[in-house]
Amino acid sequence: MNIFRIVTKKFFSKTIIVPILVFFFVFVFDRVMKIFIINHQLNYQSIFVNDYLNLELVWNTGIGFGLLSLDANMYYHLISLVIFSVIIFLFYLINKAIYVEKILFSLILGGAAGNLYDRLVYFAVPDFIDFHVKDFHWFTFNIADIFITLGIILIIVQDLLLKKK
């Protein structure tokens, strides 16, 4: 068997194709929603969905849910470097993980890559999902944050409840 056939067989196996598709779905879905919100809010006000949800664009220079939002250039670049390092580490984890974990890490990787893309292009991340009850507003977040959080929760559940000891 030649080297091309070995590499092709490993790269195009189900164990890597599905995580790649999950990654691209999360990344593209996040990008499409952010582009829609950015374009909509250039011309209009926020979108009222119901008494508990608005879609309103907020530019976040911090990390998930607006935490560590700072105007200082050095901190912004440091946070971006940490996010880039986490993405590199996620590639390593995906390579070493079992099939289910590859998919869960791909959820996180797709969201992290979407937010890093925004940090590099816009120098901020567009957050737009605003949950609230009367005057209490949760942190504004985006689609990438949802997938990152979902991936982390599912990894914890999988690790605590489903792994054999």
Image (spheres, grey):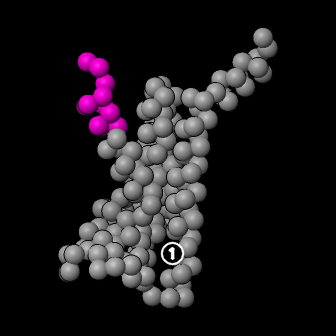
The quadrant of the image that shows the C terminus is top left
Q: Residue furthest bottom?
A: 44
Residue 160 sits above or below residue 141 on the image: above
Residue found at x 29% / y 80%: 51
Q: Is residue 82 visible?
A: no
Q: Classify residue 73 as left or right of residue 131.
A: right
Q: Residue furthest front?
A: 50
Residue found at x 51% / y 49%: 110
Q: Nearer the viewer, residue 107 or 127?
A: 107
x and y, in percent, of residue 122 in the image? 53, 68
Residue stretch rendered in magenta on the structure: 155-165
Residue 141 sits above or below residue 155 on the image: below
Q: Nearer the viewer, residue 121 or 3?
A: 3
Q: Classify residue 135 as left or right of residue 143.
A: left
Residue found at x 58% / y 57%: 28
Q: Classify residue 83 as left or right of residue 165.
A: right
Is disc 1 surrounded by few (<14), some (14 to 19) or many (20+) residues within 10 Å? many
Q: Secondary structure at mark 1?
A: helix
Residue type highlighted by circle 1:
Ile
Q: Nearer the viewer, residue 136 or 52?
A: 52
Q: Classify residue 17 as left or right of residue 159.
A: right
Residue found at x 56% / y 29%: 15
Residue 146 sits above or below residue 35 on the image: above
How many numbered marks have been drawn onto this rendered protein structure? 1
* Predominant secondary structure, magenta span: helix
Q: Residue under circle 1? A: 37
x and y, in percent, of residue 20 in the image? 59, 40
Q: Is residue 11 magenta?
A: no
x and y, in percent, of residue 124 in the image? 46, 67
Q: Is residue 138 visible?
A: yes
The quadrant of the image that shows the N terminus is top right
